[in-house]
Amino acid sequence: MLTDEEKRELTRELNGPLKLIRIPLGKSHEATEFLKGLYRGGNGRFDPLVLINGNPVIEEGTKIGVFAEIYDKGGIVRIGANCDIASHASLNCADSHKKVLGLSSEIECKPITIGENVFIGQSAIILGGTNIGHHSVIGAGVLVPPGDYEPYTLFVGSPCHVKAGYYRRTVLEACQKD
């Protein structure tokens, strides 16, 4: 249980200029529930602790877990309907390494497209230049390399192993039963 002082500190940090929130050690669940309570009355579509930068297109029915990050620049991130993006997942269209190294004066941004009915596991990372086909599954902790991927693909492991079409038969058979 959070102490009154911990609640006051969380509230101060949430309303502070940096929006940096330090969670008390061993109390992440209690702190998350407390912070959610501060946001009651919001739009309710996504958890208040989801970080969305820019204006990504996120279709209806998509769920995004706490502490997930979606970074969009200019509307180039698109997420299809009925996706499930787990906690701590990151979709980031920007790559600033060339700018930091002095090799470019600009941050490079590339589109990200996620098809419908895609599951993105906890702490997975999707980089700019990635197009994921519908009905695909990205396992927890997977770093998906940029590229075009067909529907029904499974992404697992580190480094990422891509199993194209892995779920095709299973999903199509399930659809025929309905």
Image (cartoon, rainbow, N blue to C red):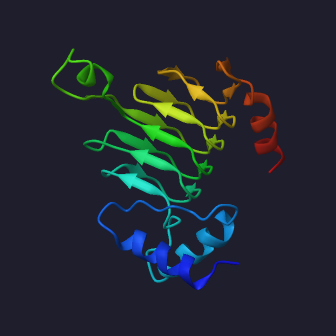
- Image coords of residue 161 (percent x, y): 68, 18
- Image coords of residue 51 (percent x, y): 43, 55
Quarter-wise, where is residue 105 in the image? top left
Tell me the residue at 53%/65% (across/down). 47
Task: Identify which residue, 61 or 111, lies in the foreground.
Answer: 111
Count of numbered badges drawn on the protein? 0
- Image coords of residue 146 (percent x, y): 47, 21
Q: Quadrant of the N terminus?
A: bottom right
Tell me the residue at 31%/52% (across/down). 55
- Residue extending furthest toward the top: 103
Tell me the residue at 50%/63% (across/down). 49
Q: Is residue 22 above or below residue 92?
A: below
Tell me the residue at 43%/47% (across/down). 70
143 horizontally vs 137: left or right: left
Quarter-wise, where is residue 172 in the image? top right
- Residue extending furthest toward the left: 105
Task: Identify which residue, 2 or 72, lies in the foreground.
Answer: 2
162 horizontally vs 95: left or right: right
Task: Identify which residue, 101 or 46, lies in the foreground.
Answer: 101
125 horizontally vs 93: left or right: right
- Image coords of residue 100 (percent x, y): 26, 24
